[in-house]
Image (spheres, grey):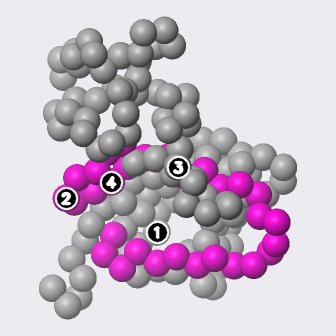
């Protein structure tokens, strides 16, 4: 892999990107977690995300979970995608229908397609994860 164009580098803080509009070069992109953290977009009062890599068969980015104010469950199911998550910062839990696991920095999670799941941050600090979703064919395809 060669060097990316110089206009994809921040002028002061090291490598970065111009924007998170999804218009990154297809063949190369260099960025930092710190740069992406500045581009997080809130989805709701708990979850913010940035997806700098988005292609027909996969997406990758950061997701930040704020500690919940209530203990309610917020299940999500990706019907057409496998999820890989890698915890970068914080402590939390991954809930599946019949089990629950503690997650912390360095933990790698795989969630198969059609698996209801719920991540939540524990303590006073947010839970930051790098994620990849990979599209898979559904049984109907």
Of the residues under marks 4 and 1, which one precedes in the sequence? 4
**Badge 1 local density, few (<14 within 10 Å), some, or many (20+)?**
some
Q: Residue at x 35, y 27 (%)?
A: 18
For label 4, the residue is 59
The residue at the point 84 percent across, 49 percent down is 124
Q: What numbered label is drawn on residue 111?
A: 1
Q: Does the magenta stretch include residue 74?
A: yes
Rendered image quadrant of residue 5: top left
- Percent of width and height locating residue 102: 71, 61
**The N terminus: image quadrant:** top left
| Span shown in magenta | 52-81
Predominant SS of the magenta segment: loop
Residue 85 is left or right of residue 30, and the answer is right
Q: Find residue 122 and report its horizontal and vertical position in percent.
A: 79, 57
Give the Cα distance between marks 2 and 1: 19 Å
Distance between the Cα atoms at labels 2 and 4? Answer: 8 Å
Under tag 2, what secondary structure? loop
**How many C-alpha atoms fall within 10 Å of the one at disc 3: few (<14), some, or many (≥20)?**
some
Badge 4 crowding class, 10 Å Cα cut-off, few under 14, some 14 to 19, many 20 or more, is some
Callout 1: SS = strand
Badge nearest the viewer, 3 or 4: 3
Kindly tell me whether residue 39 is visible in this rendering: yes
Q: Which mark is residue 56?
A: 2
Taking the image as shown, residue 104 lies to the left or right of residue 8, namely right
Specify the quadrant of the image occupied by residue 56. Answer: bottom left
Seen at 15% across and 85% down, the residue is: 141
* In magenta stretch: residue 104: no
**Which quadrant of the figure has residue 105?**
top right
In the picture provided, is 1 more to the left or to the right than 109?
A: left
């Amino acid at each position: 892999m060669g060097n990316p164009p110089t206009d994809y580098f921040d002028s002061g803080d090291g490598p970065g990107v111009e924007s998170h509009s999804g218009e990154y070069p297809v063949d190369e992109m260099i960025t930092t977690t710190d740069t992406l953290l500045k581009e997080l977009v809130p989805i709701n009062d708990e979850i913010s995300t940035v997806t700098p890599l988005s292609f027909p068969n996969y997406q990758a980015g950061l997701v930040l979970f704020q500690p919940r104010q209530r203990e309610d469950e917020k299940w999500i199911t990706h019907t057409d995608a496998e999820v890989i998550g890698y915890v970068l910062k914080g402590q939390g839990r991954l809930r599946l229908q019949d089990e629950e696991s503690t997650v912390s920095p360095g933990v790698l999670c795989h969630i198969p397609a059609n698996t209801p799941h719920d991540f939540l941050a524990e303590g006073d600090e947010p839970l930051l994860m790098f994620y990849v979703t990979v599209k898979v064919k559904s049984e109907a395809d």
